[in-house]
Amino acid sequence: MTVPKAGPAPMVSRRTFIKTMAASSGVLAVAAVLPDGVFAAEGGSTPAFPHDPVAFVRIAADNTVTVILKHLEYGQGVATGLATLVAEELDADWSQMRTEFAPAQVPLYGNLAWGETVQGTGASTSIANSWEELRYSGAAARQMLVAAAAAQWHARPDDIVVEGGVVKHAKSGRHATFGALAAEAARQPVPIEVALKDPSTFKLIGKSDIKRIDSLQKINGLAKFASDFRRPGMLRAVIARPPRFGAKLRSFDAKKAKAVKGVVEVVEVAAGVAVVASDSWSAIRGREMLKIDWDDSAAERRSTGQIMAEYKAAGNSRGVVVNRVGDSSVAMAGSAKEIEAEYTFPYLAHAPMEPLNAIVELKEGGAEIWAGSQLQTLDQGMAAQVLGLKPEQVKLHTVWAGGSFGRRATPNADYIGEAASIVKATGGKTPIHLVWTREDDLRGGRYRPMSYHKLRAGLDAEGHLISWEHRIVTQSIQVGTPLDAPLRNGLDIISAEGAANQPYGVPNQQIDVHILRSPVPVLWWRSAAHSHTGYAVESFIDEAAHAAGKDPVAFRLGLLSEQPRLAKVLRLAADKAGWDTPLPQGRGRGCAVVESFNTAVAQVAEVSIGKDGKIKVDRVVCAVDCGIAVNPDQVRSQMEGGIGFGLGAVLRNAITLADGRVEQGNFDSYVPLRLSDMPRIDVYVIDSGAHPSGVGEAGVPPIGPAVANAIFAATGRRLRDLPLSNAKMV
């Protein structure tokens, strides 16, 4: 998911804090309110002050410290990372820490990187936008605990220390737990200023020995996902959606469906025909018995090959220019050598392990929702719109989610709107649990856009890169949605991120984009446009290096003089991979370096080609600079996960259409990466004092081009059409 870039938050000493007090139950609750200018999106307005007294940190009489998470945890580890920020400044013991998902409420729980107007998780912003917010909340709570202890012990606050969740006064030998002081702390005045720790004194931030806060409850089954919730009288529902995108319902016959045991009701909704039953299996069987007549007059009827042919035809002319430096045409004409290449990328599904599902219950005066919500503000608003309510009348319970990769962050809140529409169509008589099957998920759209890239470069007689032209043909994720603001006069910079701002210092550049339309719905996919622009740029820069007769690493470094972070991770990855060490015949190394979501990642892949032509990725060395690594072990995990996720996609994943119908339906035809395919991965995290950036997506873009460049090193063949399994290696 992509939002306008936000820079590091400057350190400031003055904060406003708000608290709620429940002295009778011994609870201290604190929230930090950041002043103007702390974390505003680039080019955007400064976030406004929230005024609602809802806390980010809650300390209870039982000595637990609960961090209220405004972000969704779907496996990326932010629950642990965000709790670490509070625990560090609070000087809590890690065993005390708990987490709880926040209600849908802006601006208090708004994403600071998005201007506080939307609560949501995406673009790898969770840690970055909470870095000061939660640290200040923890520091404020600590100061109030110290003040409470000082008042009780008639001591000076400066003589009191906090260590491992215990407040201590050395002179008197007194000590107390947070829980014992919580009620008195809640009566203390809220601090106007607090001091944050110097990074040199961190005890938790930057350490790898912290256990994930959600691991145990996910292992023992106590963690509740949407499918685990039961509401009184709840019914299950599935929807029959049109087999071609853009088709409309003409008519349906539900007689046989209603005869299926367990089926309670069949209703028409905007998405298609919903079958409501006592259980999911009965609903699915009922759906199979529906007789539906679809109107395909406005539907996508083309096959994949036809769509790509139109993309390539569009690529023969200039699109809307998104970046121009110097004069690429003049420089190209004067070059000593000219090279060009074309790259194609298929639609890709997100395919999270937990398919979409949500519970919606209509109540007197409002509604409640239980879902792994990624964009709480949009989901709450869509449900309210469908049900004829105000957003504040919809109570949204965010729960654990089993993966997303962007799929749960839809601009139109599709599955939430579907569930609400079924409740409305059935008169709100019972809570409805909408369930998507695996086939619904893979055939339901919201794919990573299909795209075509055409690149041309010119080199002078000394092998210097003097001209660079890059044309992209794709679909826009945001045009036609509530988030289409970045589109101006046909300019969609989001579709060209990673290409329009490619890092190499080429004196003459032109990047242009064609945005084509299709009824096939598209969405940001883990690392968004970087997943294909990174492949095109890093593959083509490799081609330019070989055309210049230069080493691919050295060639890149020569063009990265103004990109020290990228140069540093590239050098580190190459050094740790033994870049200059020869490999046996049939094996090759390739490199790639990409900055995405303010995080620099370089990867070196080693591949071998079997006698049967099968591509085997044997090893990947990864270097990452994400600023301060709050939990280095989780950074490594996210790099490993991103590499595995990206590797499965580039090796064999594709969503293809035949006469407008999706050909894949489950993991037998859309095959995820297997453990047996996973290479050895070595991750090196740069020690940095910079503001932390995101790691959930940044590991994905470099792996594809690193592998493709390694294949070239091993075989002399350039593979430019994804997935790589389409290529015949023998």
Image (cartoon, rainbow, N blue to C red):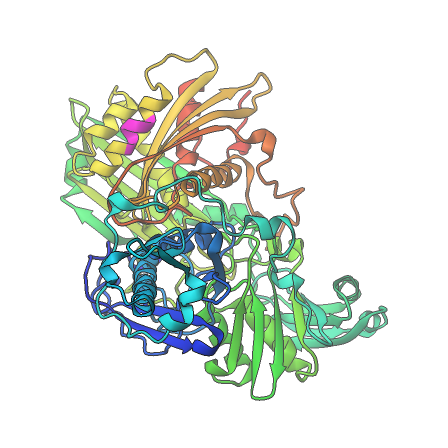
Residue 588 at x, y percent in the picture: 42, 19
Q: Quadrant of residue 675?
A: top right
Magenta portion: prevailing SS class: helix
- Picture quarter with the C terminus: top right
Taking the image as drawn, is residue 67 in sight? no
Question: Is 435 displayed left or right of 203 in the figure?
Answer: right
Q: State the residue in front, 63 or 612.
A: 63
Q: Residue furthest bottom?
A: 365
Q: State the residue in front, 296 or 37.
A: 37
Q: Residue at x 29, y 33 (%)?
A: 569
Residue 583 at x, y percent in the picture: 42, 13
Counting every numbered tag in the picture gives 0
Q: Residue furthest front?
A: 172
Q: Residue at x 32, y 66 (%)?
A: 153
Residue 21 at x, y percent in the picture: 40, 77
Q: Is residue 74 above or below residue 265?
A: above
- Picture quarter with the N terminus: bottom left
Q: State the residue in front, 323 or 502.
A: 502
Query: Does the magenta run of residues contain 10?
Result: no
Residue 713 at x, y percent in the picture: 40, 20
Q: Which residues are magenta?
A: 569-573
Question: Is 211 displayed left or right of 506 in the figure?
Answer: right
